[in-house]
Image (cartoon, rainbow, N blue to C red):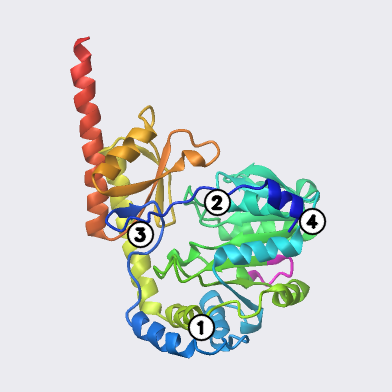
Amino acid sequence: MDPESIRTGERVPHGGEPDQSLLDFSANTNPQTPDGVEAVYADALEASRRYPDDSYADFRDAAAAFVGCDPAQIIPTPGGLAAIRLAMELTLEPGDEALVPAPSFGEYAREVHLQGATPRYIDASELLEVETDLLESCALAVVCTPNNPTGAAADPDALTAFAARCDDAETTLLVDEAFLGFTDLPSAATLEREHVIVARSLTKLFGLPGLRAGFAVAYGEQRDALETARRAWSLGTPAARVGAYCLRQEAFVRETRDRVASERARVCGALETECGFDVDHSDAPYLLCDVGERSVTDILASAREAGVVIRDATTFPGLESHIRVAIKDRDANDELLAALGAEMDGNETNDSSGGAD
């Protein structure tokens, strides 16, 4: 990282609520975890009296089978964000430019800045259409699929074509697949291109964000450089063992995908018809909502009073009237809808009382 950029850098806002008495719809994590995780964690905790096996053979095997690559291509990291930083440390130098989608995950631009490089923002919906001449001026291009906060997943054919143009331009393509496990779409790991680096997070799909487990996928010299640069003992023993266990829970993954798809459609319909929100199409476990002329601040406060925390999406560039809500299980989603419905009822009451003026 660039020392001067670190001194002038800033943190970025995220979802996540520390008050466990509230329902947290601001963080997009699975409310369920696979059966048997507790026992695996307990065994791993006892094994933590020794340093982890830095080869992480079992974790690499499980991760490789999950995304469809060879175990040698897996680089263990403590979460998806650690994989993103590792890729940017490898790729960017002070003065470089990086294509960054907007609106999207705020850490991309922050990590680019920390390397002393400059983010070049491209509309997230148009990023895969960028041609070779623009790519040639950038050392790195970032794709988030499904994109956060909009929820739209990249079309596999369009992503493949974009990867080919990045190859022609000698631009590294970093594909963040933190939420791709909630879909049936193939990983960019299957492209097997040396200039493509994939970042994966386990903690969202398996409902364990505090565990901090993830990995990168890379090929050729990129793979060798990432393996050399990663920290020794990248994963603690509990993270490595629980992560490997979760990655093999195929039935849990299928059930999660089915539940999220069903509940997402139901919640989306209610938000549009009952709350009057304009909701983006989503392939992810969250929905981005334009609340129109209503006050985002008032909506957040009213929902919190009802015991529900939702994400203020106005912190994303260009989203001045938006909130983002996670998709949980049916009972929790009903509480979300009730909280937002109560807010709507309050607005309707205020509107009718003010009509006499």
Between marks 1 and 2 in the image, the one whose residue lies nearer the viewer: 1
Q: Are marks 2 and 4 in contact (CB under 8 Å)?
A: no
Real-space Cα separation, disc 2 to disc 3, in angstroms: 22 Å
Left or right, 340 with reference to 223: left
Q: Residue at x 36, y 47 (%)?
A: 310
Between marks 1 and 3 in the image, the one whose residue lies nearer the viewer: 1
**Which badge, 4 or 1, is on the more N-terminal residue?**
4
SS assignment for the magenta stretch, majority: loop
> Disc 1 residue type?
Thr
Question: As rendered, which of 44 and 204 lies closer to the eye?
Answer: 44
Q: Which residue is mark 2?
A: 105
Q: Residue at x 55, y 56 (%)?
A: 155
Callout 1: 10 Å neighbours few (<14), some, many (20+)?
many
Q: Which residue is mark 4?
A: 93
**Which badge, 2 or 4, is on the more N-terminal residue?**
4
Circle on res. 261:
3
Quadrant of the image for the N terminus? bottom right
* Residue 192 drawn in magenta: yes
**Which badge, 1 or 3, is on the more N-terminal residue?**
1
Q: Which residue is mark 1?
A: 237
Quadrant of the image for the C terminus? top left
Real-space Cα separation, disc 3 to disc 4, in angstroms: 41 Å
Real-space Cα separation, disc 1 to disc 2, in angstroms: 29 Å
Callout 3: 10 Å neighbours few (<14), some, many (20+)?
some
Taking 276 as reference, is 284 above or below it?
Answer: below
